[in-house]
Amino acid sequence: MSHTPTLAIVGAGVIGISWARLAREHGWTVTITDPRPDLRDIVTAAFGDDPAVVATDDLAAAVRSADLVQENGPERLPVKQQLFAEIGAAAPADAVLATSSSSITASEIAVDLEPGVAARLLVGHPFNPPELMPLVEVLPGSRTAAETTETAVGLYRALDREPVVITTELPGFVANRLQAAISREARYLVQEGVVSPGDLDTILRNSLGLRWATIGLFEGNVLGGGPGGIAHLLAGVGAQTGGIEPGVPATDPESMRRLVEAVEDTYGSGAQVYETLARRRDRRTRAVLAALADTE
Ligand SMILES: NC(=O)c1ccc[n+]([C@@H]2O[C@H](COP(=O)([O-])OP(=O)(O)OC[C@H]3O[C@@H](n4cnc5c(N)ncnc54)[C@H](O)[C@@H]3O)[C@@H](O)[C@H]2O)c1
């Protein structure tokens, strides 16, 4: 791209501000819009008086010069439908219109949109926090133009993200479906008293988490089988563990209350705890990313 790209952020919560940070780190111009009365305080707290970051409560003005609009408003279908009708009317005709939505699909949002707007809309689902997590799940809807998907992939790559295009709009997409499967088993093991929340996290961080930061699941299978590869693994260890029935966690209110209590006993709760844990997460994520980059 010959000009300095502009990212328009619609919805300045946890995800919106993190996208904005990523774009600024890459030298993009950023406009941020959100109806919340403390918008300017939030933007000043994150960016100081950076002249390349503009905060406004005027949605149309915020998206008018965007190359990429990234919407991060509430996860409610009517809100996103209304937002994209307004975004589509005001954004440049060649801008990519993306939603960070974790569950609502582009096809659902586009139902009543003008064809020219629907063609430019897709899901660009990040993993929290988008400024550090490279993954963006790109899900075109049934009315999205192929060219939009290509342009979106290029824009996310320009932000050093790792976009993966997923053409089936399955609830939870892919990453959160994987997370849900593991979370289900983790809650079951804690509820059954097999392991505490803290020990479960220690087990995950020191085994699968570290492994999956480097090689992924199927590559791990190939390596786990030794020179015989995945075929050897599935015939050997895989055959022994293949009969594990997944545990089903209890979801009644009392069981969920006890689970929440056990997790809060381990990590605490509230705004102060959130700040401390988020800073620690970001430090550790940066350290792993830097160490991995050193090996390339
Ligand atoms: N939190 C996560 O882990 C995560 C991860 C990936 C994707 N997402 C998705 O990102 C989106 C935002 O999530 P979040 O966690 O940042 O939520 P959040 O509650 O932190 O932020 C939402 C923001 O939207 C603003 N908003 C409300 N109405 C609006 C409107 N009409 N126009 C513009 N802004 C409006 C709110 O004032 C708030 O600042 C959701 O679609 C969510 O599914 C969240």
Image (spheres, helix red, strand yellow):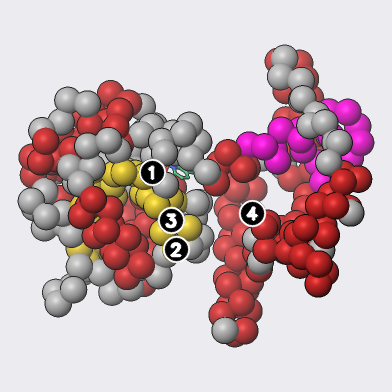
Q: Earlier in the sequence, mark 4 or mark 3?
A: 3
- Which residue was labeled with disc 3? 164
* Residue 254 placement: quadrant: top right
- Under mark 4, the amino acid is Leu
| Front position among marks 4 and 3 | 3
Stretch of the chain drawn in magenta: 180-200
Q: Earlier in the sequence, mark 2 or mark 4?
A: 2
Residue drawn where x is 36% and y is 72% of the image: 25
- Asked if residue 239 lies left or right of residue 3, the reply is right
| Front position among marks 3 and 2 | 3
Q: Is mark 4 within 8 Å of ligand 1?
A: no
Which x, y percent locates residue 94? 11, 55
Q: Earlier in the sequence, mark 1 or mark 2?
A: 2
Q: Residues within 10 Å of mark 1 (few under 14, many from 20)?
A: few
- Under mark 2, the amino acid is Glu
Q: Residues within 10 Å of mark 4 (few under 14, many from 20)?
A: some
Q: Is 185 contained in the magenta span? A: yes
Q: Secondary structure at mark 1?
A: loop
Q: Kindly check if marks 3 and 2 are in contact, taking CB atoms under 8 A apart as contact.
A: yes
- Which residue was labeled with disc 1? 167
Q: Residues within 10 Å of mark 3 (few under 14, many from 20)?
A: some
Q: Quadrant of the N terminus?
A: bottom left
Residue drawn where x is 16% and y is 54% of the image: 95
Res. 277 mark: 4
Which x, y percent locates residue 235? 85, 52
Q: Can see residue 44?
A: no
- Which residue was labeled with disc 2? 162
Q: Kindly check if marks 1 and 2 are in contact, taking CB atoms under 8 A apart as contact.
A: no
Q: Is the magenta region chiefly helix, strand or loop? A: helix
Measured Cα–Cα span from mark 4 to mark 3: 28 Å
